Image (cartoon, helix red, strand yellow):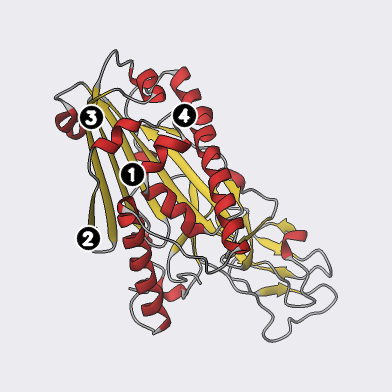
Amino acid sequence: MFLKNSWYVAAWSRELGDTPLARTLLDQPVVMYRAGNGAVVALEDRCCHRHLPLSMGAVVGDDLQCGYHGLKFDASGVCVEVPGQSSVPPGAMVRSYPVVEKFHWVWIWMGDPDKADEALIPDWWWADHPDWASARPGPLYIKCNYRLIADNVMDVSHLNYVHKSSIGSLATHEFPVVTEREDGKIRMTRWIYDRPPPPMYRKAGNFAGNVDRWQIAEHIPPCFSTNEAGCAEIGHGHEDRETGGGMKIFALSAPTPETGRTTHYFFAFVRCFGLDDPELDQMFQVGMVDVFREDVAILEAQQAMMEFKPGANQIDINVDAAPIAARQMLDGMIAAEQAGRGNRGG
């Protein structure tokens, strides 16, 4: 079950050109391409003649031509040409989807097109700001429900076990997690004082000893999360977080459901230090992706076991407060959408 009236990341901008790209999103087959003027087009990936996927066709100017009988469809999904006849049959069209290019991603609106509002895209301005460096790895294809990914990124305690050689530290257990619920957002905050930084953060920030650290995760349903992680010299954490001192990074997560059990995981890393350091670029473009790949094994194993033992008992612990709040918020939005209320279902 998905929230339809919402933006989702459908592709990296760099993935699209004059060759059709097929991608299933929210159980719907979609084809995307760039028209001759460079604009992104997203259509239902099905010819309305004999149902061949339009992604098996070709881009011709601004239109997409079916590879079976040559019917052409424009950016609105309307069939504009049928080879061998002078007129187009009534009703010859496929669905088109609103799209927006922002933060180097292509965002798609899968619900009521009249409700598509660009202002509802998360304001991840760091991804386009000259004072921030960005790492933009390709998406990961994960065999799990997208909600498990949202749970994972809102749960910073698993870092101590799944990522203990890179970004985890058992010292974090000594400090409490605070969960806050705002209008349309869940925030999880943890401050760690006078403790050793994790191995990757020590290297990135050149810290010689203990540091003050912070972990702040924010989640906007249905699937958008920011994980802010920072380190500063002891006694300067709160000040440096506000002024940009020390080391601060954001992991931007936008897992888009393919089906109820598979996900296209789009993510990026942005940082406000070492902007011209190629070694740091490599660390975040490759090293942090390896960290995320450690999560993939966990998430796919979770999904497999949930399918093997559906309905098995499951307990909750204190660190689950933020993921549970995020799930409850999304459930309420989906229920409201199905009842016909609200713009994004809430």
- Does any portion of residue 281 appear in the rendered image? yes
Image depth: mark 2 or mark 3 in front: 2
Task: Looking at the picture, tell me which residue is in the foreground, 124 or 236.
Answer: 236
Q: CA distance from mark 2 to mark 1?
A: 20 Å
Q: CA distance from mark 4 to mark 2?
A: 31 Å
Is 33 on the left or on the right of 294, as rendered?
A: right
Residue type, mark 4 in image: Phe
Name of the residue lying farthest toward the top: 208
154 versus 279 height, above or below: below
Q: CA distance from mark 3 to mark 4?
A: 19 Å
Residue type, mark 3 in image: Gly
- Label pair 4/2, CB-CB below 8 angstroms: no
Q: Position of residue 249 (x, y in %)?
A: 34, 33
Q: CA distance from mark 2 to mark 3?
A: 25 Å
What numbered label is drawn on residue 182? 2
Res. 125 image quadrant: top left
56 versus 231 height, above or below: below
